[in-house]
Each structure stands twice: as structure tokens, then as C-alpha cells.
Amino acid sequence: MTIRILLAGLTCLSLGACAIAPGPFLDSDRLDTSRQPQYAAPKYEVTPIDIAYFAQERAAAKPSVCPLKCLTPEERATYDYQIGVNDQLTIIVWDHPELTGGGVNLPPIPQGAAGGATPGNLASPQGSTIAALSPSTGGESGLAVRVARDGTIFFPRAGRVKVLGKTTRQVQELLTKAISKTIRDPQIDVRVSGFNSQIVQVTGNVRNPTPESITDLPLSVLDAINRAGGAQTDADLQDVGITRNGVRYRVDVASLLETGDPNQNVILKDGDLVDIPDRSNSRVFVLGEVVRPTSLPMNRGKLTLADAIAGVNSLDVRNADPRSIYVIRGVDKSLGADKSPGADRSLAPDVYRLDMTQVDAIMLMTQFQLQPKDVVYVQVASVARFNRILDTITPALQTLFFTKELAR
């Protein structure tokens, strides 16, 4: 009688073990699971990673497109700086120092004197006065004026002149036309001696984040990064952002450094914000039947499927199915990769599958380039799933067996 009572107690305890078993458990009594999906689960086409896939990718490869205006040899040759508010201009009127305030009186040069005319020692008619360059300092005489808030400058005999948005050559033509009424054939030189109107902010993973001035030389994104001391070791140069008018444009500076792609060297404008992020978003996830599931950082935006598998110490030889290695890729809408109008491709992943039992699979793994936030998933083998089912029900079967044996 005592044995039967003990057996009954053990049986009740085994049936209610789920209520007192250790480990994490979420009570679902307070959860409302009555809401059902409003649409059927979609099916996604799986693309095999084989030789045909690479042939198709190469045939469909398109040259990179510059997201904004980029620094090409043609752009460099035609670039002109446009004057802005607070810029400082240096203006020289040759032979008329009274207009620029920097002239010197030169004594007459005797006939047959040794030496020739130099920038600091110019031959002139007796008694004339001209603006001269100082050979000792390398500087030049001239009138320095600052562009006012209304975009104008004041110059003697010309009055107020509108210079905002103009080039130095255009300002030179305006001043020449203005003072030619009182001076015959004036020779004027206009230069920007202080670039204060156009600023670009450089921030993120650079050694010296600082605002950069745009000068008479075009400022590209690569120039801005170099001026800021260069990128730090953990910078993600594949995802450099240029924010202009509230819109962030992605620039692949890593491709520019590796291949010299001119379609990534964007010319910066006033008010641009250049941000260099770290590599926290430039990583891939390797899950499933591998030895060490983890996330792996990309090196300069590059990581092959073979690198990812090797980075987790290869497949779990006991449980993995080498025929079913999947790469699940969410398409980033900011890259313009939408394949259908109006479709939210960020929620419709592309799925690729590699069969490692094929002889060319190892070679293909080394050529398949992963993208940031790709998920590599190694499927479990069917026999491993069966074994796990057995492992799950074996304790219950053993309990029933021993209970039966004790009841005899």
C-alpha cells in the first residue's frame, strides 16, 4: 500500500513538473493572443549561390553613381569660388596706390643701372608712384575689405559694389568698369585673402573633428577627412554620410581609397555635415548550427561568406546541414535598391542558399561578399532534429518506465 501511494505521488509530481521546474518562464495568462495576422505569410524566392549567380551578377553590374556632384578632372578645371558674407578680399589697383593704401614712392632708376625690375623694385618713369610687392615678406600691398551682411563691399571711386555669389574675376570686371570713368585703363587684381563664409562640419570617428572652410580649391569629402586628421581605426568608411538640406547621402569612401572611384569623392558645399560612423552597424550575424554563433565586424566594409563561417569556428559537424547555408539580406531603401514601385523592401528580404557539398562551394564562399547586417543562418540537419525530439521525450519515457516497474 505504501509503495502504491509513493508511485501515485511521483506520477503527479512528474505531470506537474512544468509548474515548479527551474529556469525562465513567462506566464501567458495575462497575454491576449487572439489577434491573428491580417495577411498570409509571404514566400520568398531563394537564390542559389552558384556559378550562374556570379555570372548574372557580373552581367548586371553597373558603374557606381555619384550621389551628388563629385570631384572629377572636369569639375576641378571649371571650379570657381563664389564670394560670401564675411569673406575678406584684397584688391590692388596697379599704379594707383592712393586707392589701395599700400603704395611706396620709388626713386627714379638711372639708365644702365645694374639689375632688372623685380616685384619689389619696379622700373617706372621719374616721379611716378606705384603699388609694389615686398620681397622681404613675400606679401603684397592692397586694400583689404570685408564683405558686409548685405553682400556688398565699398571701394573708392566705385562706391558700394554687390559681390555676393560672384567670383573674383566677376568682381574684377565690376570694379574695372566702375573706376574706368575716372582712371584710364585701370589694372585691378582681386583675391580672396580670408575664407570666412562657407563652413563644413566634420564629425564622428576622425582624429580631429572640426569645422572646415571652403576655399578657392574645391573641398571634397576625402579632403575634409584628411584635414580632420584622418579616420580612426574603427571608422566605417563605407558608410560616410553627407547631410545636405536635411537629407543624408551615403558615400563609400572605402571604395574611393581602394579603387580610386571618382564617383564617391563628393564636392562639399556650405552647411554640409560630414559624419564618419564607427563599425557598430557594419557587421554580420552568424546563427544556427555553428560552433560559436556571434556577430562579426566587417573590415573596411568587406567580409566574405567564407570569412564569416571561419569566424565562428566553422559548422557544427554533429548538427549542421551543409546543404542549407542561408544568407538573409534586408534591402536598405536608402541605397535605392527598391525593385518595385512603392514596395517596402526593408521588410522583404533577399534569401541566398549555398550547398557546401558541391565541389565548387568553397571557391564560391570566398567570392560571395556579405553586406552590413546580413544574417548567415546554418540550417539544422533532419537527423539532428529527430535526435532532439528523442532527447526531449526520453526523460518522460524513462519516468513512465520506472513507474511501471516499481508498480509491479
Image (cartoon, grey):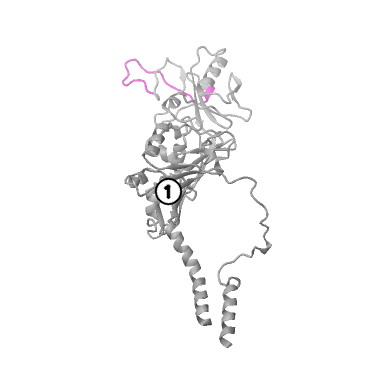
**Image position of 152 with respect to 331: above or below:** above
Query: On the picture, is 235 further left or further right than 1?
Result: left
Q: Which residue is mark 1?
A: 298
Quadrant of res 75:
top left
Q: Where is residue 337 drawn, in percent x and y?
A: 51, 37
Q: Which residue is more in the foreground, 89 or 367? A: 367
Q: Which residue is more in the foreground, 331 or 381? A: 381
Is residue 260 visible to the viewer in this orientation of the structure?
no
Which residues are the magenta region? 99-118
The answer to whether residue 111 is magenta is yes
Q: Looking at this rendering, what residue extends furthest in the front direction?
A: 408
Q: Residues within 10 Å of mark 1 (few under 14, many from 20)?
A: many
Q: Where is residue 253 drawn, in percent x and y?
A: 44, 39
Residue drawn 37% across the image and 23% down it:
118
Magenta stretch prevailing secondary structure: loop
Quadrant where the N terminus lies? bottom right
Q: Secondary structure at mark 1?
A: loop
Q: Where is residue 30 drawn, in percent x and y?
A: 68, 62
The answer to whether residue 113 is magenta is yes
Q: Where is residue 276 drawn, in percent x and y?
A: 49, 44
**Image position of 280 with respect to 246: above or below:** below
Is residue 114 visible to the viewer in this orientation of the structure?
yes
**Image position of 124 with respect to 371: above or below:** above
Q: Amino acid at mark 1?
A: Met
Total count of labels: 1
